[in-house]
Image: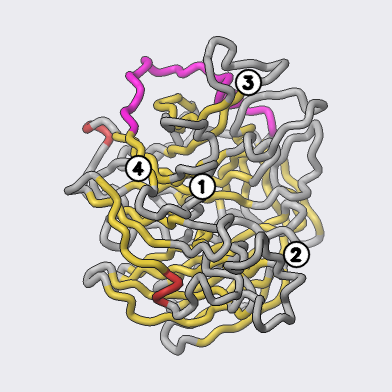
Amino acid sequence: MKLPRRDFIKRSSGAATAWLALPTLSGVQPASMQAAAAKPEPPYRTSWYPFTEHKDADTCWSLSVGPDGRIYAAACAESVPGGVVQVVRYNEHRDALDYLFSLGEMVDDPGDSGRATQCKIHYSFAPSMADGVLYMATHLSGPPIDQPAYSPWLSWHDPKRCFRGSALLAFDTRTDEVLWWETLIPKEGCRCLLHDEERHRLYALSYPRDHFIIFDTRTRTRRDLGRIGSINAQTLFLDRKHRVWTTDDYGHLVRYDPERDRLERSPFVLPHDPEFQTGWHSVFYDVAASPEGDCVYAVTWIAAPRLMRIWLDEGDWPRVEDLGPATQKRDPTIPKDTFVDHCGGLVFAGDGQLYFVASRWRDPVHNPMKDKPHEREGVVWRLNPATLERQEVAVLEHPTQPAQYVSRGAVDHQGDLFFGNVGTRPVGVFKVHLPAGRKKPNAHLPIRMWG
């Protein structure tokens, strides 16, 4: 695919060199401000599937395609004392959700144990194509059954209340059996998970200590390489050289090179809003690899999320293109709820285009929703990698509330898009029906190996 020519500036520090795209890019504007160059299409049809059979479900942090090409989601229950996550799967024949199991039961850590609960799977589905296994790891936050809230710091040394630890579970998607489970990270949750299938390794970030964890799936043993920072990145991703990438607290790339067996930190700060940000808290929220595998598209987490394209094999440190704000322009002197200003669900579909969901809301100065009855909405955008043009293709319609916060997106083997919803109850999963001309068989391949 021929990508557009860009203008770049070179920045050096010692032996390291990085190429950063100039922040003003021709033809790239905030999603809500850009007029589509192509002929307008009818909005894509959307469907909504609430977690009706898990009455305590209050968030959906993880959604992924499995090695079988089907969509899996985590019906999390983190605000309810004693709440436990259930794993669900979209059934294309019934056009409904199947509830596979309660994770607390499978790992012998029930919701009424008196400890903090196995309440959620947080960006931690990771497929194994060779054997059809879907790995998953749990995160903390759900309170014990008799307490209103849980603090991992307060209860760290309390054997009766402390979270037992992130449970890593191997689920066989061919037989629908749980093969085994282990405690991946004692006392801590797993913020995000990645699978390097060729090297038989899982990588994880722990919470609250933000440690980098390596787990060998053959020996089922773990190593802790130490702390990255205090603000967890929301994703880890893999390149063609088997290097693992993430970010630190101040918006620097961090990588683990298995050949050197060490963590390394880039001297360069990732793109951010120059008006009111320094790069602090610019951790990755979501990352999607291009189908060719030569670059990734990433978005940062909360407060003016920034979209970027990263060429991982160019130079000592990657070449980073600033693709501009993911959400609308706003007045930075007016406080904004970071839950509202959000972008997530990055996924490539069978048409080779990047799709993502970005929030749009009423703003006292820049108001793209002046004539609309609701205060905010989740807009599905399509980005053309060749031209970098963005086009609005759908708005996620929740029956009772706004749906601007999408955690993760995935495409199934039939070519339709799915997005996990986070908000007030009821939560669940959206399906976006792509036109037939934008689908292809096994559209989920190459599969995403991280949560």
Position of residue 36 in the picture relative to residue 145 (left or right): left
Q: Residue 391: say if magenta.
A: no
User: Can residue 281 be seen in this snapshot?
Assistant: yes
Q: Residue 29: say if magenta.
A: yes
Q: Which residues are magenta?
A: 23-46
Q: Amino acid at mark 2?
A: Gly
Residue 372 image point, x, y percent: 52, 14
> Badge 3 is on which residue?
362
> Badge 2 is on which residue?
229
User: Can residue 259 be seen in this snapshot?
Assistant: no
Going by the picture, which residue comes out furthest to the top?
A: 371
Instruction: Name the residue nearer the viewer: 287 or 199.
Output: 287
Q: Nearer the viewer, mark 2 or mark 4?
A: 4
Q: Quadrant of residue 306?
A: top right
Q: How many angstroms separate mark 2 from mark 3 (CA)?
A: 35 Å
Q: How many angstroms separate mark 1 from mark 2 (CA)?
A: 22 Å
Q: How many angstroms separate mark 4 from mark 3 (CA)?
A: 27 Å
Residue plotted at (35% across, 57% down):
88
Q: Amino acid at mark 3?
A: Arg
User: Circle 1 — which element?
Assistant: strand
Q: In the rendering, which numbered label is found on residue 49?
A: 4
Residue plotted at (72% across, 74% down):
155
Residue plotted at (54% across, 10% down):
371
Residue 307 image point, x, y percent: 59, 39
Q: How many angstroms separate mark 3 from mark 1 (CA)?
A: 21 Å
Q: Amino acid at mark 1?
A: Ser
User: Circle 3 — which element?
Assistant: loop
Residue density around tag 2, few if under 14, some if 14–19, many if 20 or more, within 10 Å: some
